Image (spheres, rainbow, N blue to C red):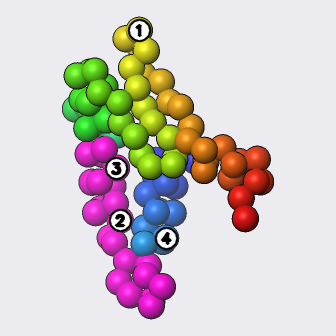
Protein backbone atom coordinates (compact mmCIF):
# COMPACT_ATOMS: atom_id res chain seq x y z
CA UNK A 1 0.00 0.00 0.00
CA UNK A 2 1.50 3.34 -0.99
CA UNK A 3 0.80 6.71 0.60
CA UNK A 4 -2.08 7.66 -1.71
CA UNK A 5 -3.79 4.32 -1.03
CA UNK A 6 -3.25 4.77 2.71
CA UNK A 7 -4.78 8.26 2.57
CA UNK A 8 -7.77 7.06 0.55
CA UNK A 9 -8.40 4.01 2.74
CA UNK A 10 -8.03 6.02 5.94
CA UNK A 11 -10.43 8.65 4.60
CA UNK A 12 -13.00 5.96 3.81
CA UNK A 13 -12.61 4.46 7.30
CA UNK A 14 -13.27 7.76 9.09
CA UNK A 15 -17.02 7.62 8.44
CA UNK A 16 -18.71 7.26 11.82
CA UNK A 17 -20.91 4.30 12.79
CA UNK A 18 -23.86 6.63 12.45
CA UNK A 19 -22.87 7.45 8.86
CA UNK A 20 -21.59 10.83 10.00
CA UNK A 21 -19.19 13.06 8.16
CA UNK A 22 -15.81 11.66 7.21
CA UNK A 23 -12.51 13.49 7.14
CA UNK A 24 -11.48 15.05 3.85
CA UNK A 25 -8.59 13.57 1.86
CA UNK A 26 -6.45 16.69 2.42
CA UNK A 27 -7.07 16.51 6.18
CA UNK A 28 -5.93 12.88 6.37
CA UNK A 29 -2.89 13.62 4.20
CA UNK A 30 -1.93 16.57 6.41
CA UNK A 31 -2.13 14.41 9.55
CA UNK A 32 -0.04 11.63 8.00
CA UNK A 33 2.55 14.17 6.78
CA UNK A 34 2.74 15.67 10.26
CA UNK A 35 3.14 12.31 12.00
CA UNK A 36 5.43 10.56 9.51
CA UNK A 37 7.09 13.51 7.76
CA UNK A 38 7.75 14.53 4.18
CA UNK A 39 10.82 14.94 2.01
CA UNK A 40 11.00 18.58 3.13
CA UNK A 41 10.62 18.09 6.89
CA UNK A 42 10.69 15.30 9.44
CA UNK A 43 7.52 14.24 11.17
CA UNK A 44 6.87 14.19 14.89
CA UNK A 45 7.92 10.53 15.15
CA UNK A 46 11.33 11.23 13.59
CA UNK A 47 11.76 14.28 15.81
CA UNK A 48 11.00 12.29 18.94
CA UNK A 49 13.39 9.50 17.93
CA UNK A 50 16.15 12.02 17.29
CA UNK A 51 15.64 13.31 20.84
CA UNK A 52 16.06 9.77 22.19
CA UNK A 53 12.37 9.18 22.87
CA UNK A 54 10.37 6.04 22.16
CA UNK A 55 7.03 6.59 20.42
CA UNK A 56 4.43 4.06 21.55
CA UNK A 57 1.16 3.72 19.65
CA UNK A 58 -0.89 1.70 22.09
CA UNK A 59 -0.98 -2.00 21.32
CA UNK A 60 0.03 -1.35 17.69
CA UNK A 61 3.69 -1.08 18.62
CA UNK A 62 6.51 1.35 19.23
CA UNK A 63 9.20 3.16 17.29
CA UNK A 64 12.59 3.59 18.91
CA UNK A 65 16.12 4.52 17.99
CA UNK A 66 18.69 1.76 17.74
CA UNK A 67 22.30 2.81 17.05
CA UNK A 68 21.20 5.82 14.99
CA UNK A 69 18.59 3.86 13.05
CA UNK A 70 14.83 3.89 13.49
CA UNK A 71 13.34 0.56 14.54
CA UNK A 72 9.78 -0.66 15.01
CA UNK A 73 8.68 -3.20 17.60
CA UNK A 74 5.16 -4.53 16.96
CA UNK A 75 2.77 -4.63 19.89
CA UNK A 76 0.90 -7.66 21.15
CA UNK A 77 -2.41 -6.79 19.46
CA UNK A 78 -0.78 -6.31 16.05
CA UNK A 79 1.17 -9.55 16.36
CA UNK A 80 -1.94 -11.48 17.41
CA UNK A 81 -3.94 -9.96 14.54
CA UNK A 82 -1.29 -10.96 11.98
CA UNK A 83 -1.26 -14.50 13.37
CA UNK A 84 -5.09 -14.70 13.35
CA UNK A 85 -5.09 -15.05 17.14
CA UNK A 86 -7.64 -12.32 17.87
CA UNK A 87 -11.18 -13.01 18.93
N-term mark: 4 or 2: 4
Distance from the alpha carbon under mark 4 to that under mark 2 = 11 Å
User: At 42% across and 46% down in the image, what residue appears?
Assistant: 57
Reading the image, the residue beneath label 4 is 13
Could you tell which of marks 1 and 3 lies nearer the N-terminus?
3
SS of the residue under disc 2? helix
Q: What residue is pinned by disc 1?
A: 67
Residue that badge 3 annotates? 32
User: What's the CA distance linking mark 1 and mark 3?
Assistant: 26 Å
Q: CA distance from mark 3 to mark 4?
A: 14 Å
**Would you say the residues marked 1 and 2 are in contact, meaning their CB atoms lie under 8 Å apart?**
no
Residue at 60 percent of width and 50 percent of height: 77
Q: CA distance from mark 4 to mark 1?
A: 36 Å
- Which of the two discs, 4 and 1, labels the residue nearer the N terminus? 4
Q: Residue furthest top?
A: 67
Which residue is denoted by mark 2 in the rendering?
Answer: 25
Contact? badges 4 and 2 (CB < 8 Å): no
Decide if residue 14 is in sight here.
yes
Q: Which residues are magenta?
A: 15-35
Q: Quadrant of residue 7?
A: bottom left
Instruction: From the viewer's side, name the closer residue of 36 and 79.
Output: 79
Judging from the image, what secondary structure is the residue with disc 4 in?
helix
When the figure is inspected, residue 20 is found, relative to residue 77, above or below; the finding is below
- State the residue at coordinates (51%, 63%): 9
Q: Nearer the viewer, residue 19 or 58?
A: 58
Amino acid sequence: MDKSQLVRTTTDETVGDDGGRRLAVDQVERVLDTVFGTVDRPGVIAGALKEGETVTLGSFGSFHGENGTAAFRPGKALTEFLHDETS
